[in-house]
Image (spheres, rainbow, N blue to C red):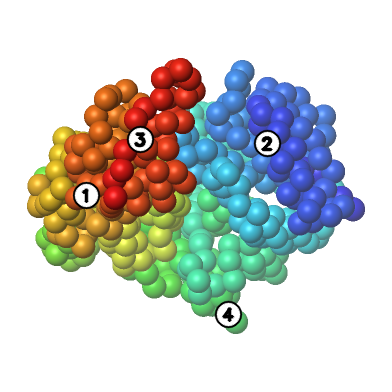
Amino acid sequence: MKRTLLIVDDEEFIRLGIKAMIEREFPGNYQFYFAEDGEEALEILASNAIDIMVTDIRMPIMDGITLIGLLRQFERRPAVVIISGYDDFQYAKQAIRYEVRDYLLKPIVRTELHQTFTRLEQELKQDEEINGMLSAAAMKEEAYRQNEIQYVLLNDEISGGEVAARLEKSGVSELQTGYCLGLVQAVEGRAEGNAVLQTRIDEFLRSTGQPGEWRFTDKEGRSLVLVHEERRLNELLDHLGQGRLKSCQMGVSEWSEEPEQFREVYLQALKALRYFFLKSTPGMIRYSQIQDKPYCGEIPKDEIIKIGNMLGTGREQEIKTLLAQVLEYPKILRYDISYMEEISKAINDLIFDKIFFIYGEEAVEILKLYRQIGSLYQSPNFHNYYHGVENLLERLNDFIREVKSTHLNQKEMRAALEFINLNFERMDLNLAMVSNHVSFNYSYFSSVFKEYTGMSFIQYIKKLRLTRAKELLDHSMLKVYEISAKVGFENPKHFNKVFREAEGISPMEYRTRTAALHHPSVLPEEENID
């Protein structure tokens, strides 16, 4: 059975180009739909069951960011892949925070597209296997309940009364008797993943049959487990520890008897879970263990600014030393996790965003690495984040140094060409003289000169002198030997040889031909330059 695929882009040739690439890689696998903007895409989504949506960010009428945000209104939402050009950096960074499956840069690379759709197919099949275990009625009820919980968790302006009403309406009741929440995730690279984890949690809840216990999924795909006895979360952790799921991490909220506080209780569990970023071990962290950690009033902003200023200046060791001061692990451990979050935000704002704003078009390749580091919790732990920041700084340092070197070379090369144009008639003009004029190493100048002009120094001088010589042959009464000396040749014989190699005729023949074309009744007097 073919999957349905919606391609959203305001340029027809891009829509058709993506379709052609997908058909070439996965012939006959997809039924295609097309939309020119977000508004048209919503109409298609409302009347068709779309499995995958590939959308551009910048489009007229309704852009891709708005479109993605409105997908929440649909009970059945497609898997989303973002495509964007390098100049959409600010929009792209915002889109990464949405529930998108992947983000591809234009021009789209065929191998990257193949990898993305191969992974999507695996994920969709896994989703179908899980959904197939539920009846249609149960699926509909579960989807409604999940949507209600998602609405509560995502809406920071919702009132306590509305929270309680939505929970009651979705069947999540009896919270007045007391409850707590456990937020569970699989450790990156060590567990089978959140999808399998969800299946194991459902298996535990069904097997024990405790009334009023639920599992929900938050926007990051983590499992939110509601229980009425705290010991049940310990039992769940033991159950998940069987087999290969030993690396699970759970953040546990405080006990509450207020349905109105459901969102606040979730945020407690979320905050507790985030401390695994620093701990990076399996197990359980309770909110009560971390709630009294002090807030650090000031982050090392000056040191972060200095790191940004030093990039491209050849002060790599100083950058590493300052980074170690900014991300001082023992100090970060002493404070509330918000201290680490504020440092990460400052690194993004004061270094990475600033640099991409200046060099965005040229640094598009480095943007891919920034996608992994720019959002703190995309890194599985502190040490991974530290090395990621260090690696990105090294890449940016090399990039900026190269850009600065290129700009410097262009300035010096313009000065060198100006010097040559003023002195090409000098017979003693040579590469050493010009390289000394711009204070470049002889060998380095020779290499840069060829890269800048597309020819060697000797070829450039010859071309310049011959161009001037032809002007004098055309428009002056000077003798050939006088022209030879005037444009910098050592003697007329050498001039004659070089001219013949370049033009196929001698200087005198060139003058005679030109005169015949413009003044056929007046021919120049023959000269003997031997």
Q: Nearer the viewer, residue 320 or 335?
A: 320
Does 95 appear above or below 446? above
- Earlier sequence position, callout 4 versus callout 3: 4
| Residue designated by label 4 | 244
Give the side of residue 477 with respect to residue 190, left or right. Answer: left
Asked if residue 215 can be seen in this view, the reply is no
- Earlier sequence position, callout 4 versus callout 2: 2
| Residue designated by label 1 | 491
Q: Nearer the viewer, residue 414 or 47?
A: 414
Tell me the tag on residue 526: 3
Tell me the tag on residue 311: none
Residue 102: x and y in percent read 58, 50
Give the side of residue 469 with respect to residue 169, left or right. Answer: left
Dividing the picture into quadrants, the one containing residue 346 is: top left
Labels 4, 3: front one: 3
Q: Determine contact: label 3, label 1, CB under 8 Å.
A: no
Residue 283: x and y in percent read 43, 71
Does 389 appear above or below 507? below
- Amino acid at circle 1: Asn
Residues under labels 3 and 1: Cα distance? 18 Å
- Amino acid at circle 3: Glu
- Earlier sequence position, callout 2 versus callout 3: 2
| Residue designated by label 2 | 14
